[in-house]
Image (cartoon, rainbow, N blue to C red):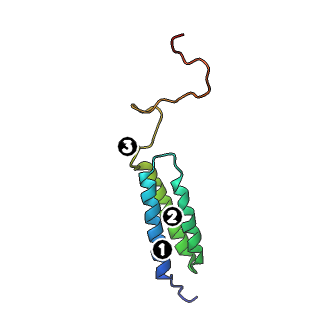
């Protein structure tokens, strides 16, 4: 089988868009699904004749998603958990007994 070269413009586009999505993922707080923006990057790689390129980009974007989860700018560099000291309290919007003075 002949060697299938990958278009350098395609590689540059994937790297540039991947970096932009990662920067967005880094600056947005946890809970915003910016990682879903990696999906078009994977779909763009389907224009390449080399299927290994799609696999490499898929693994790379998965790693970037996990890195963005563990090292967000807003969140203290750790996974957000409710039982952490200093975590914001849950706000009950359903009404009912608030436990306050009557």
Q: Position of residue 51 (x, y in %)?
A: 57, 75
| Label 2 residue SS | helix
Q: How far apart in space, not on screen, are marks 2 and 3 (Cα)?
A: 26 Å
> Which is in the foreground here, disc 2 or disc 3?
3
Indicate which disc, 2 or 3, sits on the residue closer to the N terminus: 2
Name which quarter of the figure residue 86 lies in.
top left
Instruction: Characterize the local packing of mark 1: few (<14), some (14-19) or many (20 or more) Cα atoms within 10 angstroms.
Output: some
* Up/down of 14 relative to 101, above or below: below
Q: In the image, which is nearer the foreground, mark 1 or mark 2?
A: 1
Residue 97 percent coordinates (x, y): 59, 17
At x 55%, y 19%, the residue is 98
Residue drawn at the location 52% of the way across and 56% of the way down:
35
* Residue pictured at 51% horizontal, 55% vertical: 34
Q: CA distance from mark 1 to mark 2?
A: 17 Å
Q: Position of residue 62 (x, y in %)?
A: 50, 59
| Of residues 66 and 75, the one drawn nearer to the viewer in this rendering | 75
Q: Are marks 1 and 3 in contact (CB under 8 Å)?
A: no
Q: N-terminal of the two: label 1 or label 2?
A: 1
Instruction: Evaluate if marks 2 and 3 touch, with contact meaning CB atoms under 8 Å apart.
Output: no
In this view, 68 is above or below 56:
above
Numbered label attached to residue 76 = 3
Residue 63 location in percent, x, y?
47, 59
Look at the image and tell me in which quarter the N terminus lies: bottom right
How many residues crowd around disc 3 within 10 Å: few (fewer than 14), some, or many (20 or more)? few
> Which structural element holds mark 3?
loop
Residue linked to disc 1: 13
The C terminus sits in image quarter: top right
Q: Give residue 59's mark.
A: 2
């Amino acid at each position: 089988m002949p060697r299938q070269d990958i278009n350098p413009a395609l590689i540059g586009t994937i790297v540039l868009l991947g970096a932009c999505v990662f920067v967005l993922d880094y600056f947005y707080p946890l809970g915003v699904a910016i990682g879903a923006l990696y999906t078009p990057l994977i779909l763009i790689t389907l224009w390449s004749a080399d299927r290994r390129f799609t696999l490499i980009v898929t693994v790379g974007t998965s790693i970037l998603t996990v890195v963005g989860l563990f090292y967000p700018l807003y969140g203290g560099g750790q996974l957000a958990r409710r039982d952490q000291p200093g975590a914001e309290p849950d706000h009950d919007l359903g009404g009912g007994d608030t436990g306050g003075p009557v």
